[in-house]
Image (cartoon, coloured by chain):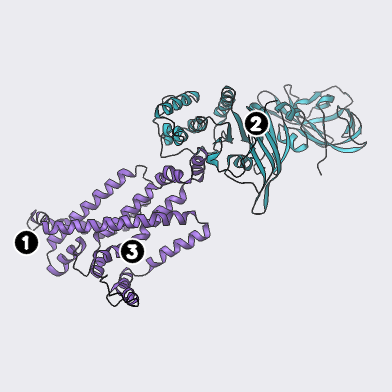
């Protein structure tokens, strides 16, 4: 396991009586692409601002390579930030924006030229040195902001929803490019987003946050396939969340039907949350003895159809490449490993 | 068609009170008393006697503008850093004196500065002989700074509070401390406000005649006093108009120079 570069210990932040961050513990490994994911107000941006030094925690400590940096001002930290709205200096041109950090470090003029040129090549903006910021498109400004941060060769790069203002196609392109840059440069990226797809695409590790606390930390596959609670399940991808009763190890009752599953260790007859992904529901016309329902609604989504199937008044969301017309009587089944059982959150 | 009708009152107003007077001034400036065309009025102004008046006016205006900038920028900066409630109160303090009559405020300074005024009475308590404070260049500059300082503070303040906070954070993030951030980010971004401030203080300073007459006692003739005298005492409207034209040319040139600096046209011009 690679060494820890950043360690957040018991971080709490209270704003005017509101606890926006509640006893957060998190460490970041070297060269990791870690994403803080959650709805707005979950504390992800606050966490990033604490790491950047723009806020100080109400309590708790931040360690950078073993050193306590909790009260260090931002200009003394070896991290750089790509801001949500880019925050490029409007009075400077592209070259001077990127050179800003280097000039402060008293890097020689010839080296500045060389490094800025290299950065512009990296972000595909060669030849844009003398352009004014206001003459650039959103995507180009985004690239300049990334270049301005990366040219300082920070050990950790913080990215605060940097792709939020871009259109879908550009966003997809930038996702791939950012991931490539991170791997090529070997810099730790801490990325904040509310877009679960973005998080799944780019991250080595995802930290799902809600209400100022961490809900789950894990690899994208684990977060998607094994969500720890109903919040994570609902936030990451689409899902059907049902009330179930755990009859025995690996046996759960849903809507009056018994289903085999792979989860153990619950009390007998314990009420649980059952999460089933829409793509994991098998739809047949033959009676398989499982859940019976009828198709209420069908929407074409491109790759698949989305069907709403009503079974005992629960509206299942089902994704399938095969479409059943509205009103058709169908039977639903789920493979045991696709049934995710979670403890009910009090 | 109908919409254009709304502009008629304004056009009429502007024609009667702005365009017509301007043409009258131009007419008088380029004619003799008998009404025939001449350039003599303008040429007469380039006499060393009058040029000295012009130079003195510009000098005094430049000095008071500079003092306003040195005093006004830190004030605007401090106010912009305060929290919203304190900010509004402080700005109100700057505006309230402007609600009082301009002449009244200037007369008040006379009673403070004069030989038997408050300052000299206070100094006499310590046995210091009365100083002649009134009717000096210093008194005129003081009057200008006092009266025109808000015109420097307000535009700078307006620009400062509009600066995006994330730009300042970005500067810290890239390794700049507070002072460097001010020099490299905040100050350059506030230049449009500084430029409007300079324009708005310099112009009334260079044309003032009330301050120089009350606080300067009329012994330092400024360009404003010169114009005033041509119309009121001498009755030479033609020469008075010619000086006005020269004045307007100087102001237009200074605006043009200022606008060169303010390339983004973000200034808060109240003119």
In the rendered structure, the answer to whether residue B74 lies left or right of residue A327 reads left
Distance between the alpha carbons at the discs numbered 2 and 3: 59 Å
Classify residue B51 by image quadrant. Answer: bottom left
CA distance for labels 1 and 3: 41 Å
* Residue A301 numbered tag: none
Q: Which residue is mark 1?
A: B34
Instruction: Say if B243 sits above or below B170 in the image.
Output: below
What residue did someone put label 3 on? Answer: B147
> In the rendering, what colour is chain B?
purple
Q: Position of residue B109 (x, y in %)?
A: 31, 71
Q: Nearer the viewer, mark 2 or mark 1?
A: 2
Q: Secondary structure at mark 2?
A: strand
Task: Locate residue A35, reporting x and y percent.
Answer: 65, 33
Tell me, yes or no, if residue B242 can be seen here.
no
Q: Quadrant of the C terminus of chain B?
A: bottom left
* Residue hosting label 2: A34
């Amino acid at each position: 396991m690679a060494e820890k570069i950043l360690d957040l210990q018991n971080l709490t932040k209270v704003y005017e009586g509101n606890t926006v961050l509640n006893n957060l513990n998190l460490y970041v490994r070297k060269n990791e692409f870690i994403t803080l994911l959650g709805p707005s107000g979950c504390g992800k941006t606050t966490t990033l601002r604490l790491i950047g030094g723009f806020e100080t925690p109400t309590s708790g400590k931040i360690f950078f390579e073993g050193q306590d940096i909790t009260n260090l001002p931002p200009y003394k930290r070896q991290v750089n930030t790509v801001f949500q709205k880019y925050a490029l200096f409007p009075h400077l041109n592209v070259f001077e924006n990127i050179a800003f950090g280097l000039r402060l470090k008293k890097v020689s003029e010839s080296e500045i030229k060389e490094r800025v040129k290299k950065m512009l090549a990296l972000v595909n903006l060669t030849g844009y040195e003398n352009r004014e910021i206001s003459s650039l498109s959103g995507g180009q400004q985004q690239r300049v902001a990334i270049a301005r941060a990366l040219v300082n060769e920070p050990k950790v790069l913080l990215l605060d929803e940097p792709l939020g203002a871009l259109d879908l196609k550009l966003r997809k392109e930038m996702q791939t490019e950012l991931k490539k840059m991170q791997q090529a440069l070997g810099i730790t990226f801490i990325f904040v987003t509310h877009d679960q797809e973005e998080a799944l695409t780019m991250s080595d590790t995802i930290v799902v946050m809600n209400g100022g606390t961490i809900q789950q930390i894990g690899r994208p596959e684990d977060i998607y396939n094994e969500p720890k609670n109903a919040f994570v399940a609902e936030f990451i991808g689409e899902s059907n969340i049902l009330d179930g009763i755990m009859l025995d190890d690996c046996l759960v009752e849903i809507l009056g039907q018994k289903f085999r599953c792979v989860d153990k260790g619950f009390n007998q007859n314990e009420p649980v949350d059952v999460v089933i992904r829409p793509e994991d529901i098998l739809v047949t016309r033959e009676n398989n003895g499982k859940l019976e329902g009828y198709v209420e609604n069908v929407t074409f989504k491109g790759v698949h159809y989305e069907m709403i199937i009503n079974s005992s008044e629960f509206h299942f969301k089902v994704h399938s490449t095969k479409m059943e017309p509205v009103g058709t009587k169908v039977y639903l089944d789920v493979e045991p490993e696709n049934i995710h059982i979670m403890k009910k959150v009090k | 068609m109908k919409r254009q009708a709304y502009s008629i009152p304004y056009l009429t107003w502007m024609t009667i009170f702005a365009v017509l007077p301007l043409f009258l001034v131009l007419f008088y400036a380029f004619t003799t008393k008998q009404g025939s065309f001449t350039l003599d009025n303008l040429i007469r102004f380039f006499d060393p006697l009058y040029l000295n008046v012009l130079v003195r006016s510009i000098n005094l205006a430049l000095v008071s503008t500079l003092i306003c900038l040195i005093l006004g920028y830190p004030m605007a900066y401090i106010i912009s850093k305060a929290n919203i409630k304190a900010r509004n109160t402080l700005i109100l303090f700057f505006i309230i004196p402007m609600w009082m009559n301009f002449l009244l405020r200037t007369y008040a300074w006379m009673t403070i500065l004069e030989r038997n005024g408050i300052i000299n009475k206070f100094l006499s308590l310590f046995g210091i002989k009365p100083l002649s404070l009134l009717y000096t260049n210093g008194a005129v500059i003081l009057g200008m700074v006092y009266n025109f300082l808000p015109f420097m503070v307000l535009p700078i303040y307006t620009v400062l509070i509009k600066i995006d906070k994330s730009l300042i954070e970005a500067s810290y993030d890239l390794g700049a401390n507070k002072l460097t951030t001010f020099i490299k980010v905040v100050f350059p971004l506030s230049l449009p406000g500084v430029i409007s401030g300079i324009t708005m203080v310099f112009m009334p300073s260079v044309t003032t005649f009330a301050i120089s007459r009350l606080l300067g006692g009329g012994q330092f003739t400024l360009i404003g006093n010169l114009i005033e005298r041509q119309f009121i005492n001498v009755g030479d409207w033609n020469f008075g108009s010619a000086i006005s034209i020269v004045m307007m040319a100087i102001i237009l040139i200074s605006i043009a120079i200022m606008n060169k600096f303010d390339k983004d046209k973000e200034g808060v011009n109240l003119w």
